[in-house]
Each structure stands twice: as C-alpha cells, then as structure tokens.
Image (tube, grey):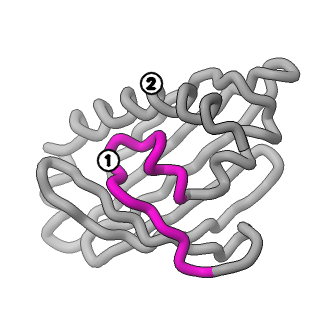
Amino acid sequence: MIRVERSFVVGLSLDDLVTYLEDFGRAEEWDPGTVRCVRVDEGPIRPGARWHNTSRFRGRTTELEYRLVTREPDRLVFVGENKTVTSTDDLNFQAESATLTRLTYRASLRFKGLARLASPFLKAEFERLGDEVAERLPAAATQRRP
C-alpha cells in the first residue's frame, strides 16, 4: 500500500472548507491527477453519494468510482475503486481561527493483483502528487468558496 500525507492551512472556516470538499466533483479544481469528476447520483451529498472520476497518471488514463463513506463535521472520507486499485482520500479538518482551517490530507492506494508489484516503484510519484495537492487545494478552495 502507498500512503501519502500532507497537512496545510486553508483560508476558509472549517464549515466552508468541509462544504467545498464534500463535493468530490471539485477534485478537478485541486487534484492534479483528476481530469474529470462527475456525480452519478442525485440528492444531497451524504454518505453513499457517488462520483465517476477520470484521472491521468504517468501518461495513462484510469477511471474509478468514488463514494463518500464518512461525512462528519471535521472529517470526510472518499473511497474509489476499479479493477486494479482501491484509493482512499481521508480529509481531517481542524479550525485554527474563524477564517483558517488546518487540513490533514491522507491518500492511500491499495493495488490489486499484478498491479501490487508496481507499488514500491510508484511511491515517489504519489509523493509528488501529494505536494501538488498541498499547493493547489488552498488556492482552489479560497477562489471558489462554497
């Protein structure tokens, strides 16, 4: 399994940041690997909500079905799957002030089948993507505001 963690401050209140990030379709704005992310169900966003995500990694396009599995006032967890990988995005929020929130972003990828053999060779690439998320997400969230 590959695990990447970044912690950084975003210039939004905790509630506003959670509201922004609970719509996983916005991953197009802050996740450098996401090419397209579209909600595939309707209604309010709550555990069970689903998105179809198209990502590009190392020149290849892959598609995952993501679902929101945890929605708490200070935590969101999304799990995406396809035949070769299970990807988990675990986002934890802590108010630093009325207008600043610390986000701890944890991404983990569990490869399946023969793809597991590639895990040790991909860690550095996912670390780089983690750096890019930490750079892009604060600006995307504050520009978009929920």
Is residue 7 left or right of 80 when viewed as pictured?
A: right
**Alpha-carbon neighbours of circle 2 within 10 Å: few (<14), some, or many (≥20)?**
some
Residue picked out by circle 2: 135
**Measured along the vertical axis of the image, is residue 46 above or below residue 102?**
below
Identify which amino acid the numbered label 2 is placed on. Answer: Glu
Is residue 100 left or right of 68 when viewed as pictured?
A: right
Residue 47 in the image: state x and y as whole percent.
Answer: 70, 70
Residue 84 quadrant: bottom left
Task: Please name whichever residue, 109 or 64, is drawn nearer the observer in this view of the structure.
Answer: 64
Q: Is residue 27 magenta?
A: yes
Residue 133 in the image: state x and y as whole percent.
Answer: 43, 34
What residue is at 64 percent from the left and 67 percent from the top?
A: 69
Identify which amino acid the numbered label 1 is placed on. Answer: Gly
What residue is at 68 percent from the left and 26 percent from the top?
A: 102
Task: Please name whichever residue, 107 or 2, is drawn nearer the observer in this view of the structure.
Answer: 107
Residue picked out by circle 1: 33
Residue 17 quadrant: top right
Residue 131 in the image: state x and y as whole percent.
Answer: 38, 27
What residue is at 12 percent from the left and 51 percent from the top?
A: 59
Residue bounds of the magenta highlight: 25-41
Quarter occupied by the C terminus: top right
**Which circle's residue, 1 or 2, is located before the other in the chain?**
1
